[in-house]
Amino acid sequence: MLRLEKLVKQYKTGDKALKGVDLEVPRGQVLALIGPSGAGKSTLIRCINRLVEPSSGRIELNGEDVTRLGAGGLRQARRRMGMIFQEYALVERLTVMENVLSGQLGYVGFWRSYFRRFPQAAVEEAFRLLQRVGLEQFADKRADQLSGGQRQRVGIARALIQGPDLLLVDEPTASLDPKTSRQIMRLICELCAERQLAAIINIHDVALAQMFVQRIVGLRQGEVVYDGTPDRMTPEVLTEIYGEEDWAATRDKGAGDGHAAQAVAEGDAMAAM
Amino acid sequence: MPITEHAGAKLWQRRTTGRQFAIWFGWLLGVALFLYCWKQISDVTTWYFFWDAPRIAGDIGGRMVPPRWSYIDKLWVPLWDTLNIATLGTALAIVMAVPVAFMAARNTTPSATLIRPIALLIIVSSRSINSLIWALLLVSIIGPGILAGTIAIGLRSIGFIAKLLYEAIEEIDKNQVEAISATGASRWQGMAYGIMPQIAPAFAGITVFRWDINIRESTVLGLVGAGGIGLQLQSSLNVLAWPQVTLILITILIAVLFSEWVSAKVRHAII
């Protein structure tokens, strides 16, 4: 469904963030993208919906090359790709309902959206989604009154109301506590399963990724260095992705259940911040 | 770094000795310049008039009280004109300033090389000319009256509103705008959903602040014939009708107090 071919992004400063990334994501697959800070994870998902313009390569979404689209075509392609952000990126001064409905902007004309006259079907879908993410009683609250976990749920609803095929998820849990992080990851993965959505989730927390996703892709300095199932994440693989560290020491204690690895990964995420 | 070693201990000072001395010298120059200017002004002052001032002020003050209260009947209409000049002038300025602000802000300008400099030029030229001078020009172009005053206030306010607004636009959180464009929103929808909510409080604050300033400015526009209560002030001064001047000043004071009360209320309600 999504296919990246030799995707390259070189910034004006000359830094190559992506050095020819090839990646194929089939319908319904949830994929975690891991790698050290600065490896190009954010750039990669921002290139897919062209918030960052790729320098060369192809991005095929349902057989259509996204890199060649004009403004109108790009808008239509973006409707198929929901995006979820680390700092939620809600419009703080708008209500929860307005934030969710803003996911429909690609379908509604300017004046209708300006006067908030969204189609009744969209409003009903917004209520359904708010109920699904557990925020139905917050529809009228302003986004800046919500807690982090609640805001991320609004962000998820906004992405889903687009009716996407693909979710681009940038560090969804980096600003959340461990419990909320798990809930948010679980919610995203459940929704992807319910709706047969593919997802690319940038994440620092390796153990959290292992708990929820079917496939892990490791990125290092703009190149894919690992692509496989979560259970094959050995200390050698982690060293390959992140560099030398005593991965085994902390891993051995929790042997198998992943909790120790969680501690490693969280420590690592802290260090990266 | 001014770290020195003395008897094995590391000493830290905020500045190096040389830098400290340079700052001290700067202050010395400043004080010397101030004293020199003081002497120059003192040399060219006609001290006879200066020593006379308290007596004259007392004399005028004596003539100014009591205010001629009955004159208020002739002030209602000019006062209403003054409020209208300020309000309509501010509205006129908003209509022109908002597009200019979007063209001047680095993150929204359609072209940083061509349109942004033009927008900045509009802002600077509007700001550099006082509304009294705008009014003088306009009175000769379109004739005396309220219209000249309104346009003068409008032209003067464009720069003020556009400058503060474009600074607010440049300071918005771009993640919110990015999130809106990621949904497939058009450029205009991005402005309406991503940018406008973020600048709304600043916009309201700036507008009310400028309206408040414009009330004060429009009270003097009459001095050059551009309508409003200044016209009455001018004619009363011309005929040395001091009790009327007192009443006009009291009226202006109350109008300004009123405008400040309104702007405080509005700002409080919006932020």
Image (tube, rainbow, N blue to C red):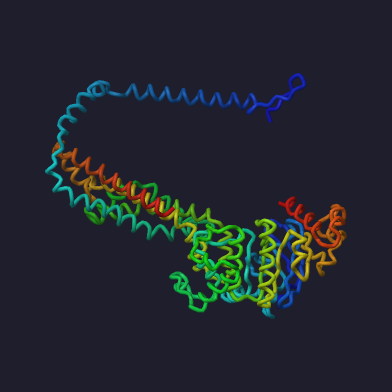
A168 above or below B265? below
Q: Residue furthest top?
A: B7
Left or right for B141, reference B241: right
Please identify the residue farthest to the bottom as the structure is shown.
A63
Residue B228 visible within the image: yes
In the picture provided, is A223 more to the left or to the right than A44? Answer: right
Q: Residue at x 87, y 60 (%)?
A: A236
Q: Give the percent coordinates (x, y) of residue A128.
A: 56, 74
Q: Residue A6 lies in what quarter of the image?
A: bottom right
Residue B78, x across and y down, in percent: 20, 50
Residue at (48%, 26%) from the top-left corner? B30
Q: Name the residue nearer the viewer: B123 or A31.
A: A31
Depth check, front residue: A207 or B199: A207
**In this view, B186 is above or below B145:** below
Q: Position of residue A20 (x, y in %)?
A: 77, 67
Quarter of the image containing the N terminus of chain B?
A: top right
Q: Is residue B128 above or below residue A18?
A: above
User: Taking the image as drawn, is residue B112 in sight?
Assistant: no
| Residue at position x 65%, y 75% in the image | A68
Name the residue nearer the viewer: A72 or A205. A205
Q: Position of residue A69 (x, y in %)?
A: 62, 75
Q: In the image, A230: left or right of A156? A: right
In this view, the residue in front, A24 or A189, is A189
Q: How many marks?
A: 0
